[in-house]
Image (cartoon, rainbow, N blue to C red):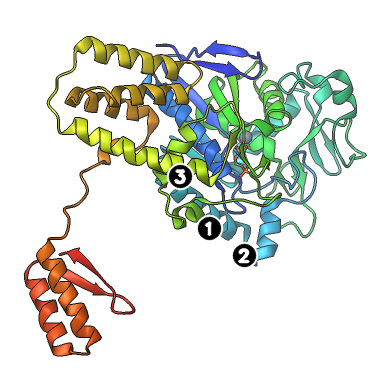
Amino acid sequence: MQLKIYNSLTRQKQAINPINNTVNYYFCGPTVYWFQHIGNMRAFFVMDSVRRAVKYLGYNINHAMNITDVGHMTSDADEGEDKMEVASKREHKTPEEIAAYYWDICHKDMQALNIEEPEHICPATSVIPEIIAFVQKILDNGYGYITPNGVYFDTSKFANYGKLGGMNQNEKKFGARIEVDDFKHNPADFVLWVLAKDNHIQRWDSPWGVGYPGWHIECSAIGNKFLGEHIDLHGGGVEHRTVHHENEIAQNYARCLHDVVDIWFHLEHLMFNGGKMSKSTGGIYTLSNIIEKGYSPMDLRLFYLSAHYSKPQNFTFEALDNAKESYLNLKKLLLKHKSATPSTDKQIIENLKTKFSEYVADDINSPLALSVMWEALKSPASHDIYDLVLDFDRFLGLKLSEVEEEKQAIPQEIIDIAQERKLARINKDYAKSDELRDKISSLGYTILDKPKNEYEIVKK
Ligand code: AMP
Ligand code: ZN
């Protein structure tokens, strides 16, 4: 079945058209200067859903994601300070230490959310020679110019500039930039290589002087290195549509002299308290915060799945409670089918599978795909349904193959001895307490003491 995705450029759903059935896929990765919150994680969940959909529908995948560890300014439009340098000063660490620390946490959160590893994960600082070569090619092809501040892209040379974000001529002419750089030819021109000020820590030699890459060029160079000159799908957060991805389109064209990306897709944000969940406006939660409050990563994943990626999703704890309850219910129903014999009509299974695949193929409709999963789970107990739902989980990613019967309850005999021991401890009869501990141990259990004479019994 062909995968169709809404293309933000042509503003219609479009079927992917991969060469040799292999989908070249790029998704803009994290800027590793701080914790990634569950809004950012929605982005990586969507990245993963698209990847899983591609595979579920029978295509091969070649997937690249950058790690931005240099050059992303506090404003996406190249103004302000480099986020890595700000973090470096704030935490008295080198930019490399900052990047390693925050990437490690982000990576672990992705793994906990069962986000599959892209084939290529690439820090921008590891491809500086490739970035320099890319910029040189843009200059050679006549799309860039050099100023005392660095190398710039000349947007007036690229007729389609502004098409993705729907910019009109006026906006192109005057731009939306806050500070106007006197050396820029057009307000919308953007930096490819920044010449470093004396106090800038991250710096590399280049044909144009010591400096560092702009943020936009990183993604184009990494995409080019790992995916080549034809990219089937390129995605990211909706805020990237007007600046970052607009610039990527222009850079790719200037480097390759043809369009590189077939389909651009954008996810809407996770909202909280009436606005986008964001570091700058406050009110954020990380995955660790959510786990501390008693939710599992799979509760959060089920919550994400319940909304279409192209719609904003409102985060509330009530909604997360619902997801937690649904996940418990899902596990219960799944186990009912697991222990049953296979007894479902083949045609019924086929129909459910087709319906599920159609929803996945139709612009990654995860809420409707979920509804097919529930429909299947609510049918009479059958191991065929268990196998079918495990197959659905290749797309859903809810770790359903790991769902097992709850561990055996602690036998009443052990509970009674433990209770007797607690009384002995309260009465300060430690000889008896030790004797009862040994008895519990000889029966295959360990007792872990907690404050105020409380305890936990675990099987050895
Ligand atoms: P950053 O590390 O700031 O570059 O962001 C990483 C990814 O998270 C980008 O694709 C952003 O578009 C995305 N993102 C940031 N905030 C949110 C949010 N509230 N909801 C969904 N995605 C977000
Ligand atoms: Zn990017």
> Which residue is at 12% across, 62% downward?
412
SS label for mark 2: loop
**Mark 1 vs mark 2, CA separation in Å:** 10 Å
For the residue pair 279 and 318, the one nearer the viewer reads as 318
The label number, if any, that marks residue 101 in the structure image: 1
In the depicted structure, whether residue 124 falls above or below residue 141 = below
> How many other residues sit within 10 Å of disc 2, few (<14), some (14-19) or many (≥20)?
few
> Which residue is the site of mark 3?
321
- Tell me, yes or no, if residue 123 can be seen here: no
Query: Is disc 3's CB within 8 Å of ligand 1?
Result: no
Under mark 1, the amino acid is: Tyr
Locate the C terminus by quadrant: bottom left
**Mark 1 vs mark 3, CA separation in Å:** 31 Å
The label number, if any, that marks residue 93 in the structure image: 2
For the residue pair 43 and 343, the one nearer the viewer reads as 343
Query: Is disc 2's CB within 8 Å of ligand 1?
Result: no
For the residue pair 8 and 272, the one nearer the viewer reads as 272
In the depicted structure, whether residue 452 falls above or below residue 257 = below
Q: Are marks 1 and 2 in contact (CB under 8 Å)?
A: yes
Ligand 1 - quadrant of the structure image:
top right
> Which residue is at 68% across, 24% downward?
249
How far across and down, in percent of the image, does residue 104 sit? 48, 53
Q: Nearer the viewer, mark 1 or mark 3?
A: 3
How far across and down, in percent of the image, does residue 319 sit? 50, 40
In the picture as drawn, the residue positioned furthest to the right comes out as 182
Q: Nearer the viewer, mark 3 or mark 2?
A: 3
Report which quarter residue 457 is drawn in. bottom left
> How many other residues sit within 10 Å of disc 1, few (<14), some (14-19) or many (≥20)?
some
Under mark 2, the amino acid is: Lys
Under mark 3, the amino acid is: Asp
Mark 3 or mark 2, which has the lower sequence index?
A: 2
